[in-house]
Image (spheres, helix red, strand yellow):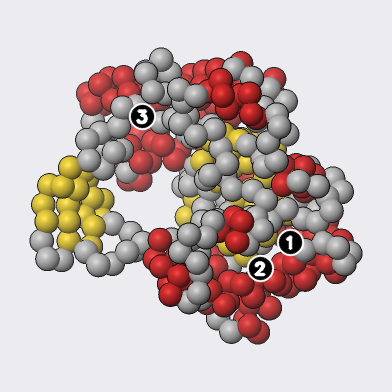
Amino acid sequence: MNRRERFLSTMTFGTPDRPAAADYPSYDSTRRRWEQEGLPRDADLNDYFGMDFDPFRWNVGGVNVSIVPGFEHRVLEETADYRVEQRGGGEIVRVLRNVPPPAMPQWIRYPLTCRTEWPAFRQRLSPDTPGRLPANLAAIAAESAARDHPLGMWVGSTYGYMRDWWGLEALSLLFFDEPALIEEMIEVVTHLSVTALRRVTAAGVKLDWVMFWEDMACRSGPLMSPQMFRRFCAPFYRRVMEAVNAAGVKVVMVDSDGDVRPLVPLWLDLGVHVMHPMEVASGMDIREERRKYGKQVAFFGGIDKRALAGSRAVIDAEVIPKLRAGFADGGFIPACDHAVPPDVSLDNYRYFRDLVNRCAREVYGPSAG
């Protein structure tokens, strides 16, 4: 099987020669550490570790279903300790100097602070804005059927986008104080996502997967109730899924950190069947969700990234039971539950990947892994 065939068979509970391999990208700081520990500086991590799927690289590049044009990137203040900058999303943040990601910046101002700012901001969400789609879409379409890797598209967001525009506190109040504005914003992003998806597929691009992005939960649970999700977000998903199904896309994923357990059945009902990244620190466990939903749900993620910084015994205890359970049922690409942090050594990460291959051979036979 090639990478594309293996990915599709894995995520649709088929009979792959081995489970598809993939992972969340590492931070730049992680890569720098690994290069000091022996990773070739020019190494492509997908090739180096034998990956079959990469949603951040093997997608229809140049498609933008968020704001276009972006805001000007400007440095507003700089000291020996930090830098204040306006970023392309319009947010103003304070970034600590010499403290690379995964350290988070401090948000000082969000791009939207009151209703009167929305009409001008909305203009950046028109599907007809030049630069919304790649100029080489025809060439991508011509190559899409013959490629050996899975190709897909990120298809937008409801809560995740609005949280980035308003901030968590302001957005939470808007759901109660300005529900009509919430509905208007979601209608705008729905029109944008559906139009972009239809134009890409109408050009002849054969998509294997789509990914929604939300990040709509924290460690203690979703940041909106299931009832509010049904009212405000579900219409977006239904309309995007109409276009997804019309295009014959087989793998439909959602990316949301946090404890999304109350939302999983809602996504499944809407046709979203792959959960990512299944953040362990927030209580997500692939075994628990599989017991609840069987083969209705598939997973990309589910491995506690923190464990990979520990001893081999710690890694074994976290990884082996999940691999055996997930591989037995299928529909599982084991991966870290977020970007691989810089406290994970190259040796430990290699050990994790070898462990994945070893457990795959246990279930799929000696030729796997």
Q: Nearer the viewer, residue 206 or 157?
A: 206
Mark 2 or mark 3, which is nearer the start of the sequence? 3
- Residue assigned mark 1: 287
Q: Amino acid at mark 3?
A: Ile
- Residue assigned mark 2: 353
From mark 1 to mark 3, how far is it between C-alphas? 38 Å
Looking at the rendered structure, the secondary structure element under dot 3 is loop
Q: Nearer the viewer, residue 189 or 69?
A: 69
The residue that appears at 27% across and 20% down in the rendered structure is: 119
Is residue 335 something that shows in the picture? no
Mark 3 or mark 1, which is nearer the start of the sequence? 3
**Disc 1 or disc 3, which is closer to the eye?**
3
- Residue assigned mark 3: 67
Q: Is residue 280 above or below residue 191?
A: below
Looking at the rendered structure, the secondary structure element under dot 2 is helix
Looking at the rendered structure, the secondary structure element under dot 1 is helix
Mark 1 or mark 2, which is nearer the start of the sequence? 1
The residue that appears at 43% across and 61% down in the rendered structure is: 27
